[in-house]
Image (cartoon, rainbow, N blue to C red):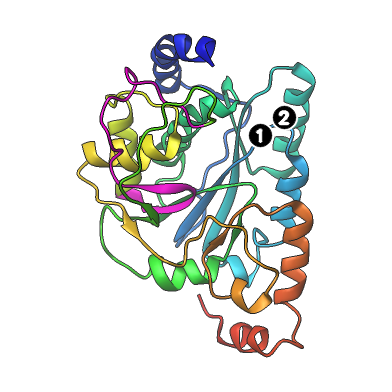
Amino acid sequence: MAKWYNSTKTTWLYAKKSILRSHFIGTVPTCQSQQDLKLVIVVCSAPQNFAARQAIRSTWGKESRWTKNTKIFFIIGRSSDSISDMFVFTEQQEYGDVIHYDLLDSYFNLTLKSVSLLRWAATSCTNAKFVMKSDDDMFVNVPVIFKTVIQSDATNDLVGKLIVNARPIRDRSSKWFVPQDMYSDKLYPNYLSGTGYVMSQSAAILLHNASYSAPYICLEDVFITGICAKLGNIKPKDNHLFTYAKQKKNPCKYLYIATAHRMTPNDLYDTWDMIHNMHFRCAMSFWNALDV
């Protein structure tokens, strides 16, 4: 932990210079050819999590009526070994939905991944009305997001599960440890859970621009939706349909929430099968009413 922290400021200076350059690897996918694109979802994934990406491609990420006017991409950093990078490159060529960037993919570099996501959205997907950031262990209910968020015409929207009055953790043994000289205030600004949040295209651009002048912090959700949002005069908004808790296997509940966390690939397949099971009355009424 101490070694990581001592190198953070140097890493951030290097990373900012790298991100400002063209730092994507291989063929960079774009959204520009798709007309009437209302939502692009960018899923943060680790190089080794191929099974999670396949589960998303086979369930809520399918190109179908479920994801009408929506595009889904995966953003992945470099691995510490060349074999994993080779597999990611092959996946990128096969599916065309992988944004591969030239910075090490690690937990303590998640802030860099999120800034890279914003960089991509601001340069390669400018025709999307809204941008969503999510993780690869999430269930995302695209129709619910359309009905509760995308219908808004508000500019600079930033919506998700709001975290209020959170205190920095000073315990060095904690995964979320933040030293005093990295962030000295007693409370974080209000921010959204990084498991899944939606922003308008104008908000994504403001957050991207603010990220290069914001003081670095390793917690990506605090950095992007708290610190950068504050610099960009954007107020993150709470939506109770966004959750970061693991949900019980209740098909009716999954049909009426925006996000669910801690989903294994098997969980995604099971949930997808359940919500398509027309023996459940709630599933039948949901699919009959689906029009996004």
Labelled pair 1, 2 in contact (Cβ < 8 Å) = no
Q: Position of residue 231 (x, y in %)?
A: 22, 36
Point 52% across, 25% down: residue: 109
Residue nearest the observer in this picture, 99 or 276? 276
Residue 201 vertical placement versus 116 (above, below): below
- Which structural element holds mark 1? loop
Q: Say what amino acid the circle numbered 2 marks.
A: Phe
Q: Quadrant of the N terminus?
A: top right
Q: Is residue 190 left or right of residue 68?
A: left
Q: Residue at x 47, y 61 (%)?
A: 242
Q: Which residue is mark 1?
A: 46
Amino acid type, label 1? Ala
- Label 2 SS: helix
> Alpha-carbon distance for marks 1 and 2?
13 Å
Give the image location of residue 129, x and y in percent. 38, 57
The residue shown at (40%, 15%) is 17
Please, is residue 187 above or below residue 178 in the view?
below
62 shown above or below 203 = below
Residue range corresponding to the magenta coloring: 176-202
Residue where numbered disc 2 is placed: 89
Closer-to-camera residue (218/72): 218
- Which residue is at the front of the view, 147 or 178? 178
Rendered position, 116 above or below 19:
below
